Image (cartoon, rainbow, N blue to C red):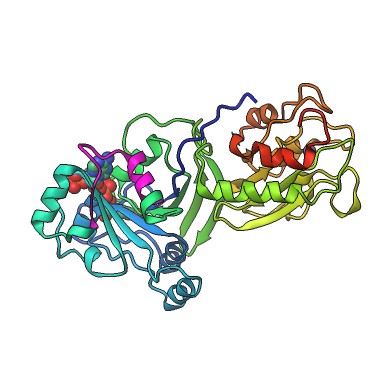
């Protein structure tokens, strides 16, 4: 497979959220926080907050805005509790200096809090009166990957919403640790050269981001983008393992065949919703492929498709005799740009098949998780190559 693979330790899905003025500012320089968004958009943000495990802001945002970072809707909080989740998402802040006001609202509202900081910052924060049990020292300098691993492994964070400010957003995007950007464009101009900007200078990989949704909300525009950097989409999360395991289970449902593989596939939206599933020869169709069967169940206009991932127990096919379009083409045609698979297609039926190469050439990220290979092969034991 020609696509580079990156299968490091699992990290949360990182969603950057910000509102900017037409001249790219996050705020003005006045003492009050500049209101950029509209009431209906604040409600949308509340809904996104209710969907995540944790909300993160930089220490600069706490100092400038003194935010509460709550889920305001009582119904959404009740729904979280009913689903067995904490009433409020975990609140996380990062600071190198540890220079934080213990009276800030951040510490006194909502549920659990965490301060990710340096060893030196931890001493400073404790000295200022930040509660000992929320302070997490992560060494001499704060490394974002280590910080995200901590949130994933120690706090159970699978979906993280980052609400600024610009310093934090810039680092996460430049370090290819952001999975999605939700940007709200407000119809006003700040004009102050000293006002904070959403993204600062530095090296950004990947060129143009991929616009996957745009929506008018009162007088602001919401745009959702997915990064296209070479590393984007190749990070592996615990959710990826869950869905690929399901794809391998679906492969067990296939009626056995001497002339085709048994494969399972699941299509999952960026927010973790299953869109469809399928398996080979499903519904009595002797030539149906798993990815094809799953995609056929989704409305081609579904706005979730561009952000979705296809999990397939076997690498999607690059060529096939039974239908005009192979699955790699069907996936690209559906707008999906991320595929997670367990096993590269052997030369059993189609010598030199390179579905991963077709997908990569079409701009999709392809991740292979070899630890699932044996499970993916199990229902194909009677075939050569398995
Ligand atoms: N419009 C919006 O959607 C929105 C959202 C959020 C914020 N804002 C605005 O953004 C402005 C604040 O932005 P900002 O860029 O100044 O602050 P920020 O990104 O919120 O926080 C920056 C601070 O975070 C800590 N930090 C970040 N990366 C770190 C690293 N790798 N290692 C150690 N510490 C790290 C540092 O804290 P220490 O200095 O303590 O070391 C740094 O000064 C405010 O004006 C606010 O109103 C707007
Ligand atoms: Zn196929």
The reply to whether residue 204 is in sight is: yes
Camera-side residue: 339 or 303? 339
Residue at left offset 66%, top offset 45%: 310
Camera-side residue: 224 or 245? 245
Highlighted range, magenta: 134-152
Residue at left offset 37%, top offset 55%: 155
* Residue 243 spot, x, y in % from top left: 61, 50
Residue furthest to the left in view is 127
Position of 7 with respect to 281 (left or right) is left
Image quarter hosting the C terminus: top right
**Rendered-image quarter of ligand 2:** top right
Give the quadrant of residue 141.
top left
Image quarter hosting the N terminus: top right
Magenta-span inclusion, residue 173: no
* Residue 4 spot, x, y in % from top left: 56, 27
The reply to whether residue 21 is in sight is: no
Residue at left offset 68%, top offset 42%: 375
* Residue 75 spot, x, y in % from top left: 46, 77
Position of 327 with respect to 157 (left or right) is right
* Residue 107 spot, x, y in % from top left: 22, 64
Residue at left offset 76%, top offset 49%: 252
Position of 282 with respect to 251 (left or right) is right
Give the quadrant of residue 2.
top right
């Amino acid at each position: 497979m020609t696509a580079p693979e990156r299968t490091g330790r699992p990290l949360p899905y990182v969603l950057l959220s910000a509102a900017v003025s037409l001249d790219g500012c996050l705020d003005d320089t006045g003492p009050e926080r500049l209101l950029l968004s509209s009431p209906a958009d604040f409600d949308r943000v509340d809904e996104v907050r209710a969907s995540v495990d944790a909300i993160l802001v930089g220490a600069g945002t706490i100092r400038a805005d003194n935010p509460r970072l709550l889920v305001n809707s009582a119904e959404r909080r009740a729904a979280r509790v009913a689903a067995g989740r904490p009433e409020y998402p975990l609140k996380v802040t990062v600071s190198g200096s540890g220079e934080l006001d213990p009276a800030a609202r951040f510490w006194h509202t909502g549920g659990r809090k965490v301060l990710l900081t340096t060893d030196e910052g931890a001493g400073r924060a404790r000295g200022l009166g930040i509660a000992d049990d929320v302070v997490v020292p992560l060494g001499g300098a704060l490394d974002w990957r280590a910080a995200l691993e901590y949130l994933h492994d120690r706090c159970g964070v699978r979906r993280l919403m980052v609400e600024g400010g610009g310093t934090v957003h810039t680092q996460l995007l430049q370090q290819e640790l952001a999975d999605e950007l939700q940007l709200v464009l407000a119809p006003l101009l700040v004009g102050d050269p000293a006002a904070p900007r959403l993204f600062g200078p530095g090296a950004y990989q990947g060129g143009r981001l991929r616009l996957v949704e745009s929506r008018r909300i009162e007088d602001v525009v919401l745009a959702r983008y997915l990064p296209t950097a070479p590393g984007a989409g190749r990070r592996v999360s615990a959710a990826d393992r869950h869905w690929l395991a399901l794809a391998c289970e679906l492969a067990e449902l296939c009626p056995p065949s001497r002339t085709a593989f048994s494969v399972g596939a699941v299509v999952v939206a960026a927010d973790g919703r299953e869109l469809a599933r399928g398996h080979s020869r499903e519904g009595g169709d002797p030539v149906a492929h798993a990815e094809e069967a799953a995609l056929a169940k989704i409305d081609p206009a579904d706005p979730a498709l561009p952000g979705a991932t296809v999990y397939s127990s076997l690498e999607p096919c690059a060529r096939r005799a039974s239908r005009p379009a192979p699955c790699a083409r069907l996936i690209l045609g559906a707008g999906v740009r991320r595929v997670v698979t367990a096993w590269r297609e052997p030369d059993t039926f189609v010598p030199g098949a390179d579905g991963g190469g077709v997908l990569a050439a079409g701009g999709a990220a392809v991740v292979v998780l070899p630890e699932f290979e044996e499970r993916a092969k199990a229902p194909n034991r009677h075939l050569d190559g398995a």
